[in-house]
Amino acid sequence: MRVVVTDAEVTMADVLSLRLAIEEPLPEGTRLVFRQRSGGAESSVILGTPGAEAHDVSVAVSLAPLALTPGRWDTYLEHGEPGRPGGRTRVQCVDPGFSLDRLDAYALSRRTLAYRAYRTLNGFLALRIAAAEPVADVRAVWFREGRFEVTGLLAYTGFTDDDSHHTARLALRPPAGPDGAVTAVATVQGVRFHAALSLCDVIAATPEYEGLWEPSLEVDGLAEPLPLGARIDDVDGKRRRVQYPDTEVDGVPIRPCYTADDELRLEVGG
């Protein structure tokens, strides 16, 4: 049973929408199976219109009722008795499944989980599921005239993408704790933010300035400060893959970097 996904998308309502190219009708009782890559947990749903005489089939699967947990899930088509030899086929995919505009729109709503369909390196359909905690998603970082500047988008906050302004400030906390934190007024319009902070103030804030400084964005209307990270796009392992230009202030080297969980830090000294 050769089936190829030509279009894959998770809609705003967390529905997995697929277009399948098939060589022969799907047998009655065909199931779409999700198998977690770590641990082997499985969940499945029976597909509709069995036996339909068509070469292109559209499938829509609501993901929330399946109770899938965070992680990566591979997809299979299965017919007949579960576990029957030859009855399960991994789903091939030709759609890269990436559109930053679509991912940005998806991230505007408050969610507990974020679902994403993607094509694996060897050409199969998979799901990536992650906790959808509010975050200031970083789009650009640079140094200019002794300042650290950052822009991005507020994700999973429920804010509307409009022209409304929100009072906000950028806070940069030293490795030793909240004492010596440096703050600056930030601009938030709708869900877009920009902030700039003096690096001289960072060096002067505390004698123990060396180490990783943690930025956060405090926005009026949100209960907790937002970490600065880069989680919406599909680039994994930013700590080793994303490199920003560094700078020096009074002989002290400063460079932006990412943690293992894709949160932004400023490495000062070292």
Image (cartoon, helix red, strand yellow):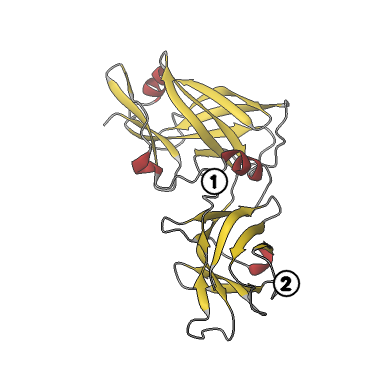
Q: Amino acid at mark 2?
A: Thr
Residue 63 seen from this side? no
251 relative to 116, above or below: above
Tell me residue 109's x, y (percent).
69, 45
Residue with the most extreme top position: 145
C-alpha separation, residue under disc 2 versus residue under disc 1: 28 Å
Secondary element under disc 2, as helix, strand or loop, is loop
Tell me residue 195's x, y (percent).
54, 24
Q: Which mark is residue 49?
A: 2
Q: Quadrant of residue 255?
A: top left
Q: Quadrant of the N terminus?
A: bottom right
Residue 119 seen from this side? yes
Give me the residue at 38% from left, 20% from top. Answer: 204
Tell me residue 67's x, y (percent).
63, 67
Tell me residue 113's x, y (percent).
61, 55
Horizontally, is 267 left or right of 97 in the view? left
Q: Quadrant of residue 164?
A: top right
| Camera-nearest residue between 256 and 182 | 256
Task: Work out whether mark 2 precedes mark 1 in sequence or the reverse, and give the earlier one.
Answer: 2
Mark 2 nearby-residue class (10 Å; few <14, some 14–19, many ≥20): some
Q: Which mark is residue 98?
A: 1
Q: Amino acid at mark 1?
A: Phe
| Camera-nearest residue between 68 and 97 | 97
